[in-house]
Image (tube, rainbow, N blue to C red):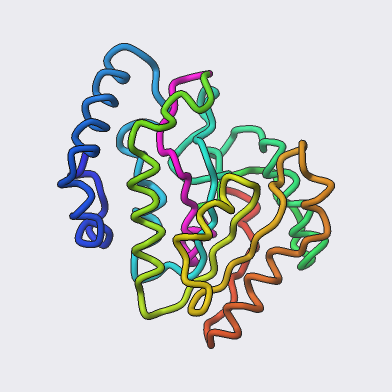
Amino acid sequence: MRELIPASWAPVLAAETDQPYFASLEAFLAKERAEQQVFPPADEVFAALDATAYQDVKVVLLGQDPYHDDGQAHGMCFSVRPGVRVPPSLRNMYKELDEDLGVAPVGHGYLKAWADRGVLLLNTVLTVRAHQPASHKDQGWEKLTDAVIRAVNARDTPAVFVLWGAHAKKKTKLIDASKHAIVAGAHPSPLSAKLFFGSRPFSAVNDALKGFGQEPIDWRLPDQV
């Protein structure tokens, strides 16, 4: 699995892939894939890192678990493959984006255009057994994705960390808030959407980037993918 880590990230994660937990994670995943259906496919597990190189990260948008239904997950948090119905949390994100910045919702949920512009769409757990949410929790992924967060935190170039919900907010301790910006708030899930709506996270991200002297994110998505 380590050979699938993209070239820009391999050096900064090398110390992790040499640790015993990573070998245990590899063994767990090999067994799971042999006996169960696992999402996303192996070649898309590190899709977020592949789409947003280490040196190009401007924003870290943190999710939790990959989507667990057929054909949804492709390795980027909140994003689904073209042709798949837009999930509820993402619909709420689109609604807030429209209210916040006047960016009209599109009819798909494929967010790679954000990743291409420097938004690292990182889940804290990168695989899941089909139809069993959180089934790959506490198998080692969290240690690796914490290392990704630490690696971005360690750069000289500041970034914006978007932490929605209690799970994501726990990662605050990994971030030097004197150098980087943290945009924290309620999760866009229907369970907490009332608190999410009106939080204006997208303009907050762009304001922080402008404060760093960086170009803001163009949050518009192509109509067709």
In screen coordinates, is 23 left or right of 209? left
- Place residue 36 in its image quadrant: top left
In the image, residue 7 lies at what x, y percent? 22, 58
- The residue positioned 39% from the left and 23% from the top of the image is 38
Bounds of the magenta segment: 113-131
Which residue is most to the bottom?
213
In the image, residue 130 lies at what x, y percent? 47, 20
Which residue is most to the front?
173
In screen coordinates, is 216 left or right of 45? right
Residue 104 to residue 109: above or below: below
Quadrant position of the N terminus in the picture: top left
Which residue is most to the top?
35
- The residue positioned 57% from the left and 78% from the top of the image is 209
Q: How many marks?
A: 0
- The residue positioned 61% from the left and 77% from the top of the image is 208
Residue 114 located within the stretch drawn in magenta: yes
In screen coordinates, is 108 left or right of 19? right
- The residue positioned 69% from the left and 47% from the top of the image is 187
In screen coordinates, is 56 left or right of 132? left
In the image, residue 40 lies at what x, y percent? 41, 32
In the image, residue 20 lies at what x, y percent? 18, 38
Residue 52 located within the stretch drawn in magenta: no
- Taking depth in this image into account, of 97 and 169 the one nearest to the observer is 169
Residue 131 to residue 127: above or below: above
Residue 204 to residue 168: above or below: below
- Taking depth in this image into account, of 204 and 52 the one nearest to the observer is 204
- Taking depth in this image into account, of 56 and 104 the one nearest to the observer is 56
- Taking depth in this image into account, of 42 and 212 the one nearest to the observer is 212
